[in-house]
Structure formats: structure tokens, C-alpha cells
Amino acid sequence: MAKTALQFRHNGSDVAIFVDGGTNLLVALRELIGDMTPKFGCGQGGCGTCSVLIDGELHLSCLTLAETVAGRSVETLDSLKQGPNLHPLQRAFADNFAAQCGYCTPGMLMAAKALLDRNPSPSRAEVVEAISGNICRCTGYEPIINAILAASGGRASA
Amino acid sequence: MTVTVKTFTSSSEAAAALSSDRNARYLGGGTLVMRALNEGDISLSTVVRANDQALMRIDPSGPRITLGAGVTFARILGERDLSFLHAPARSIGGPAVRNMGTVGGNLFAPNPYGDFTVALLALDATVALQGGFGSRDIPIEEFLQSRDRQAGTLVLSVSCTRPTSAEAFRYRKIARIKPKGGSVITLAAHLPISGGRIAGARIALGSMAPTQIRARAAERALEGRALDAATVAAAASAAAEGTSPSDSALGSAWYRREIVGVHLRRLLLGQE
């Protein structure tokens, strides 16, 4: 089966890869580009741990046909790193004990980034809505909500 | 698994490709087709796409509004003129799914999904289809009844009635997980009032049959009457008539039949 040439921006850098027909963006990112920060959870769109930003909009990479991002900008959790420093959202997650097993954390952080990018001071209800597509099977939602509120400068109430 | 991806610039070319290949599926937002691919669905060998801007069009003016098949739920939520569709659009998925999922794809979403289609069914929607032999408009009920045979046709757009007032259209999705969860049942009611009486009642139900259906007995109980307690009680007691729900992890068929009247009553009375 023929492979398709695909070029897009990955965390600010141009990348060019060849994908098999039907390859999803998550596989392309992890196996062809080597960015292991988006995780594979359910493959069905139910868990959110593969969440990435495409042109600034939150998408599920496991349900995105890789070739549909041609010429577009894809940001993963890896884009949050700032040299040796953590991104304010990552710092807030650490300070608020918002990561238990950590498997949902990449998706939670990207969903939180998508929220704060367009709404810098969200209400608690807006934070809950923003992460409603992301499942934490440790069920540690309260610390995650508090961390996002803390990162936004809001008050992390119990 | 490797499939052939065919991308076209016009919807008519995509429709032709779709109608000529039984194992082809149209890729909209990806939430159904990519999921099938991820699960290794071997019935799927070709994925057809179209980058036709006509599929992204929204016409929110007039008594009937039109949504291109490729319009996402996030875009509907951004349209102030479509506020009557905000509740059904918001009830779907989380933000990522709403950025991806489309109006056209929702028509094909099996239980416990397809909530937006419940709203469209109550709003007397018409589906514009493009097949191998031209395009045609069919009522959404007819489309849903023949949905399994529609795989070779491309949905171009959906038109539906704009309710004359916010009161005239009501929608509710019953889910165990809030704010996001699969539907136990979904209800939508369009109740135009003329001279103090209901004229042209349409009640649509999701997860109460293999596809979204109308609750015709409940509609008959409402038609030509004022929306008072006695009328609502009659409609609620008729709500399960003609339904054929299934058992699923979210609820049993028995449970669905038990609660549909309760939730219809609350919806019609404006109760939480």
C-alpha cells in the first residue's frame, strides 16, 4: 500500500513523514516523530489522554486521520516545556498533587491549556466542563480542578 | 490496518467515489470512522473525504435554518442565532469531541450517541443527500429508517425548523455521568402554540429504539390542546408506546421504558 507524504508543524518545528493510509495522528506522533507525550488510552474518543491542539483547538489525536493535519500546527504536551522550567500549568499540577498515576495528565494539561488560552480566568464550572472529555481513573478530579484554577490565578477552593 | 484514503475538492466527486465502493466510508469529524479503523473494522477498505467549503456552510436565517454536514458542534455553540440548538450541541462529548464531531456524522451515530439528531428529528429536519445519481432531500425520519442503506450516499446538509420561541423547543439528555456521558435516554420536544393550543407537536426520543424515533402517541395526546397538567399527564403516560429500547451498560430496556414518561413530564412542565 502506498504511503502518503505528510508535512505539518509539530510544536513549532516543521516535520515531514510518510504515513500509511488510515494512520491516526497519535500513531504518527508517537511512532514516526517520537513524541511520546500524547498517550494511547481507549482509541475510541472516550478518555482524552491523546488530546492535542490542532491550530490551537483541542482535538483527540487517536480519532484524527494523520493526513488531515497537512500544513496545520499540532501542539502536544511536549510544547509546554520551557528549558529546565515547568510550564505554569505543570507547576500547578505538581504543587496541587494533581497527578497520581499520571496517565491522564498529558490530556488534562492540553485540555486545561485549550481552556486558559481562550479564557484566562475560568470559573470552577468552566474548568469542570473543559476537562469533561478527559477521564482520570485514579478519580483525582478535585486536585486537577484546583490545579487548573490555581494556574489561572483563581482561588483553588475545596 | 491500512486503508486507501481518497480526498476530493468537491462533494459530488466524493459522493461518486462513495457510491461506487461498498467498502468505502465517508470521514467527517472522525469520531465514528477513525474509531472503527482503530478497532480494526475490516469492512472498511476506503476512506473518502471532501474539502468542499459548501459542507461547512451555516445558514442561520429564516424560519428554516441549514447546517452543512461538516459543521461541528463547537461552531454551532459559537453561533448566537442558533441558540435553540446550543443545549443539544453542548450535550455531546467533551470539548475535543465537539471540536471534531459533525452534524452529518451525528446522523449515523448509533445508541447511546446521536443526541443532536434527536433534536433535529423534533425540529422536522430534512436531509440533503448526494448519491451516484444526483441529489435529493428526504425527511429525517425516512433517512433514519433507511440509515443502514445510506452508506453509499453523502449527506450534504441538514435543514430544520427554527422554533418561534425559546419555550417552543425543549431538549434533555439523561446521562449517569455529568457533564459528559452516554445517553440513557434523550428527549426533544417541539411544541408550536397557536391560539393557546399546541399545533404540530413533535416529540423525539433517543436510545428508545435502534434509531431515534418520534413518540407519536405522546404527540397525539398533545395535539390541539393547551399545555396543562392533564395534557402533560396524558402525553407522559403514552411516551413509551411504540418504543423498543435495548438493554445496555447504561440502563436496561425496562428502566428506559419506566423513566421515559417521567422525563417527558418534567420536560413538558419545565421542571428540573
Image: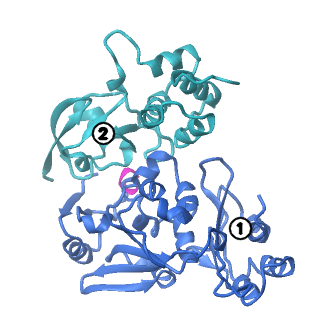
| Range of magenta residues | B36-40
Q: Which residue is mark 1?
A: B253
- Which quadrant of the view contains residue B87? bottom right
The residue under label 2 is which amino acid type?
Answer: Val
Query: Residue A27, labelled with which disc?
Result: 2
Residue placed farthest to the front in the image?
Answer: B195
Give the number of marks: 2
A34, B196: nearer the viewer: B196
User: How crowded is the residue under tag 1: few (<14 C-alpha within 10 Å), some, or many (20+)?
Assistant: some
Q: Chain of mark 1?
A: B
B183, B194: nearer the viewer: B194
Residue pictured at 61% horizontal, 25% vertical: A146
Side of B168 relative to A85 (left or right): right
- Residue B263 % position (x, y): 75, 66
Among the chains pictured, the one given blue colouring is B
Residue pictured at 46% horizontal, 36% vertical: A111
Same chain, labels 1 and 2: no
The residue under label 1 is which amino acid type?
Answer: Ala
Residue pictured at 27% horizontal, 34% vertical: A31
A131 up-or-down from B92: above or below: above
B40, B266: nearer the viewer: B266
Among the chains pictured, the one given cyan colouring is A
Q: Is residue B113 visible?
A: no
- Residue B117 % position (x, y): 52, 69
Based on the picture, tell me whether residue B6 belongs to the magenta stretch: no
Based on the picture, tell me whether residue B37 belongs to the magenta stretch: yes
- Which quadrant of the view contains residue A40? top left
- Residue A7 % position (x, y): 16, 41
